[in-house]
């Protein structure tokens, strides 16, 4: 949710958050979520956000410790029979 607020702020001409701020944040998040790279760099970048003067509270990042394990994506559980769920109806 915070990243979405940053994206919206970066599109607002009156905000001090620029599109470059959001693009760099997006890149870091993508690297963390896709490959577990740059988690430390993301944590350091978020710490800089917390120190920004005059930044509205809704644009401050959540205060949490980032670890690579937080970005691990688990696959969706599959039906053991590899069949479509039976409770779905075919569209008419």
Image (spheres, rainbow, N blue to C red):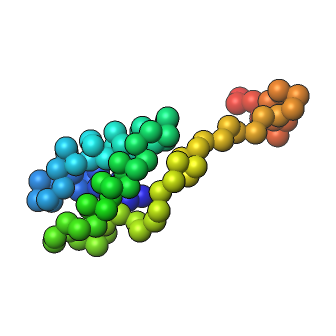
Q: Where is residue 70 in the image (x, y as percent from the top left)?
A: 55, 52
Q: Is residue 54 toward the left or the right of residue 69 in the image? A: left
Q: Which residue is drawn at 36% across and 43% down?
A: 28
Tally of numbered tags: 0
Q: Where is residue 67 in the image (x, y as percent from the top left)?
A: 51, 53
Q: Is residue 83 toward the left or the right of residue 13 in the image? A: right
- Quadrant for the N terminus in the image: bottom left
Q: Is residue 6 toward the left or the right of residue 17 in the image? A: right
Furthest residue in direction left, as rendered = 14
Q: Position of residue 17 (x, y in %)?
A: 18, 55
Q: Residue at x 83, y 26 (%)?
A: 82
- Quadrant for the C terminus in the image: top right
Residue 2: quadrant of the picture = bottom left
Q: Which residue is drawn at 40% across and 66% down?
A: 62
**Nearer to me, 87 or 24:** 24
Q: Residue 69: in sight, yes or no?
A: yes
User: In this rendering, is residue 86 above or below 47?
Assistant: above
Residue 60: quadrant of the picture = bottom left
Furthest residue in direction front, as rendered = 40
Q: Which residue is drawn at 49% across and 35% down?
A: 35
Q: Where is residue 46 in the image (x, y as percent from the top left)?
A: 33, 58
Q: Residue 59: in sight, yes or no?
A: no
Q: Is residue 30 toward the left or the right of residue 49 in the image? A: right
């Amino acid at each position: 949710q915070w990243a979405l607020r940053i994206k919206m702020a970066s599109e607002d001409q009156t905000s001090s958050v620029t599109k470059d701020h959001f693009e760099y944040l997006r890149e870091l998040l993508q690297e963390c979520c896709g490959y577990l790279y740059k988690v430390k760099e993301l944590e350091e970048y978020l710490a800089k956000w917390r120190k920004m003067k005059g930044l509205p509270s809704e644009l401050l990042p959540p205060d949490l410790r980032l670890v690579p394990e937080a970005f691990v994506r688990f696959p969706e559980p599959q039906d053991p029979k590899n069949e479509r769920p039976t409770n779905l109806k075919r569209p008419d």
